[in-house]
Amino acid sequence: MTVQKSLSPRAWAELLLLGLIWGASFLSIRIALDELPVLTTVLHRTFWAAVVLWAVVLAGRIPLPREPRVWAAFVLMGVLNNVLPFALMAWAQQHIETGLTSILNATTAIFGILVATLVFADERLTKRRSLGVSLGFLGVATTIGLGHLAQFDLRSTAQVAVLAGTLCYALAGVWARLRLGHLPPQLAAAGMLTGATLVLLPLALLVEGPPRFDLRLGTWTAVAYYSLVATAGAYLLYYRVLAMAGSANLMLVTLIIPPVAIGLGALVRHEALDANTYAGFALLALGLIVLNGPRRRD
């Protein structure tokens, strides 16, 4: 096990910026959902982001893969990292607050550790990790409320849908490490979003019909933000921060996102969360801090 990197002021600034961008994405998606159906909302996200990232790939003269298995891996990665989690969370946001969605989204790191432990021999569930994961799941149980889970109403179903989306992110992380780790990140992201778009386009047409383009300016602004800024731009920024800060420190972004989403949801849509939700987030945040704590060499 390696020593955790210390963060430079520039890394801190870009980490904070990434958290702000992703935190605001929950509100922009919720605004788009006022006028767009779920699959079309997600299709806009993957299509326009893919266009931008392919422009980056071509401008950088990054060689394209020729092996069919790589393109097949892009499609599966797009399903795991985009189609399923984006659609599940967008559907859920129609039934729960944007801030609550962002809190549950923070379990991505928890599921990521568990899935990686099951798949990779070099990933171990140490005492520290076990404590962090346990606190994280205790936070989730507190946030949702065991009573609500027993009732399994629409609200609790939406919360479970968000958790299912974060599990998809964890599975995508494993798939990326197994099949796409040798590729430049810009190419991997562009290929993944293209694969997602190829899956979403016929699905959205079949389920929701042709997409509308006579949308309000506010809806187009929201679409532009969550596709161009919070997806294409955020992926590029993510890889910059990853190179500067390392994967362990990058986990801190999950602590920045919920306060931003909660604040914007309250300010713009007058959302209010109950005490259990804040208590659950506190436990989840504590679990993430434990997971991200200082490490020593073995």
Image (cartoon, grey):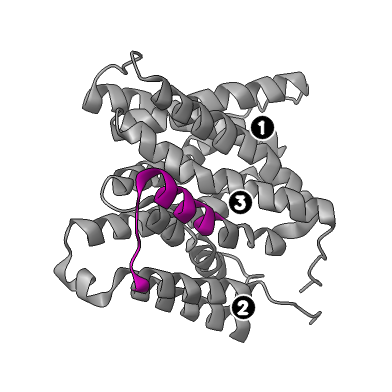
Relative to 50, residue 273 above or below: below
**Distance (Cα) linking label 2 and label 3:** 19 Å
Residue at coordinates 50% horizontally, 34% vertically from top-left?
A: 226
Camera-nearest label, 1 or 2: 2
Where disc 1 sits, the SS reads: helix
**Magenta segment:** 257-275
The residue nearer to you, when weighing 85 against 28, is: 28
Whole-percent x, y for residue 41 in the image:
37, 31
Q: Magenta segment: does it hold 33?
A: no
State the mark number for residue 112. none
Mark 3: which amino acid? Gly
| Residue at image mark 2 | 290
Where disc 3 sits, the SS reads: helix
Q: Is residue 222 left or right of residue 247?
A: left
Where disc 2 sits, the SS reads: helix
**Outermost residue to the top:** 214
User: Which comes sooner in the sequence, label 3 or label 1?
Assistant: 3
Which SS type dominates the magenta stretch?
Answer: helix
Relative to 246, residue 36 above or below: above
| Residue at image mark 1 | 187
Whole-percent x, y for residue 145 in the image:
28, 73
User: Which comes sooner in the sequence, label 2 or label 3?
Assistant: 3
| Residue at image mark 3 | 19
User: Which comes sooner in the sequence, label 1 or label 2?
Assistant: 1
The residue nearer to you, when weighing 194 against 133, is: 133
